[in-house]
């Protein structure tokens, strides 16, 4: 998943990014409400992790703006403001979850998965095409029941392809899913990732192929 973290404390932000990145997520980090607003205009994030005490105000104002403008991106509040009243206020304002600091990393990961699952209306985390299946929350890939280890960027590419199986995924959408704001993208980087992913799937005996839609993007499709 691609996540937006709005957190001004450098050490806390670094710790959160480390945890989330280890589990296959791309994390875009900004330290202020205003930068959060700008980041959200990109429309590429599957969830927002939002602190309340920020240099330019209460993070709740960003949440209020999102909901007022119809932005339904899941928002999880991460804050030291963790009284019962604070939680009630946050949830009433439209937060999908509210977690007090400090928090347990595994619980945060589980809550992010749950929020994203609710937003995408997936009853299950498992998406399949032929004998290829993927847990889209953990990025675990199975081919015929056998685990297939994929590098993170290839797994992120497969995540969006399998979720849109049978449909063309445009290059910009794939790049947004695979690369963060801070990543420098070489002109042929995406093609290289897709080429290696295609070979790994073929070598593992996957009954699904990645087709190139020339000049447009890629499509994952089951064998006919």
Image: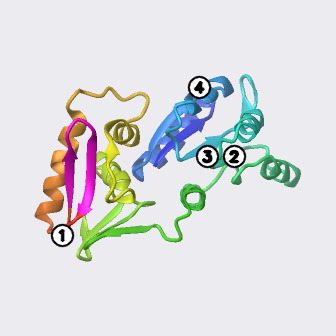
Disc marking residue 133: none
Q: Secondary structure at mark 3?
A: loop
Instruction: Please give the name of the residue rendered at 13% of the width and 54% of the height, measured from the top-left corner.
Output: 199
The answer for how far apart the CA atoms under marks 2 and 3 are is: 13 Å
Q: Position of residue 173 (x, y in %)?
A: 39, 40
Q: Secondary structure at mark 1?
A: loop
Q: Secondary structure at mark 4?
A: helix
The answer for how far apart the CA atoms under marks 4 and 3 are is: 14 Å
- Closer mark to the observer between disc 2 and disc 1: 1
The answer to whether the residue labelled 2 contacts the one labelled 4, judged by CB atoms less than 8 Å apart, is: no
Is any part of residue 149 visible from this angle?
A: no
Q: Which residues are the magenta region?
A: 209-221
Which mark is first along the chain, 1 or 3?
Answer: 3
User: Where is mark 1, residue-wise?
Assistant: 224
User: Where is mark 4, residue-wise?
Assistant: 38
The answer to whether the residue labelled 4 contacts the one labelled 1, judged by CB atoms less than 8 Å apart, is: no
User: Where is mark 2, residue-wise?
Assistant: 77
User: Where is mark 3, residue-wise?
Assistant: 73
The answer for how far apart the CA atoms under marks 2 and 1 are is: 46 Å
Residue lying furthest bottom in this view? 145
Q: Position of residue 9 (x, y in %)?
A: 62, 31
Q: Position of residue 88 (x, y in %)?
A: 84, 53
């Amino acid at each position: 998943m691609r996540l937006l973290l709005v957190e001004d404390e450098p050490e806390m932000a670094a710790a959160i990014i480390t945890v989330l990145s280890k589990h296959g997520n791309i994390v875009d980090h900004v330290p202020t409400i205003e930068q959060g607003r700008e980041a959200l205009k990109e429309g590429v994030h599957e969830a927002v992790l939002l602190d309340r005490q920020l240099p330019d105000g209460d993070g709740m104002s960003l949440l209020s703006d999102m909901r007022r403008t119809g932005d339904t991106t899941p928002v999880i509040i991460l804050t030291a403001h963790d009284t019962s009243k604070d939680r009630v206020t946050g949830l009433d304002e439209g937060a999908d979850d509210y977690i007090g600091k400090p928090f347990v990393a595994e619980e945060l990961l589980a809550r992010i998965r749950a929020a994203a699952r609710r937003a995408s209306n997936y009853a299950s985390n498992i998406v399949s095409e032929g004998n290829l299946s993927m847990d889209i929350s953990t990025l675990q890939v199975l081919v015929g029941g056998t685990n297939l280890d994929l590098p993170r960027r290839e797994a992120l590419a497969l995540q969006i392809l399998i979720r849109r199986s049978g449909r063309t995924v445009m290059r910009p959408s794939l790049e947004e899913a695979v690369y963060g704001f801070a990543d420098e993208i070489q002109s042929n980087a995406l093609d290289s990732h897709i080429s290696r992913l295609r070979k790994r799937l073929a070598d593992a005996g996957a009954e699904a192929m990645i087709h190139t839609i020339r000049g447009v993007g890629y499509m994952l499709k089951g064998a006919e």
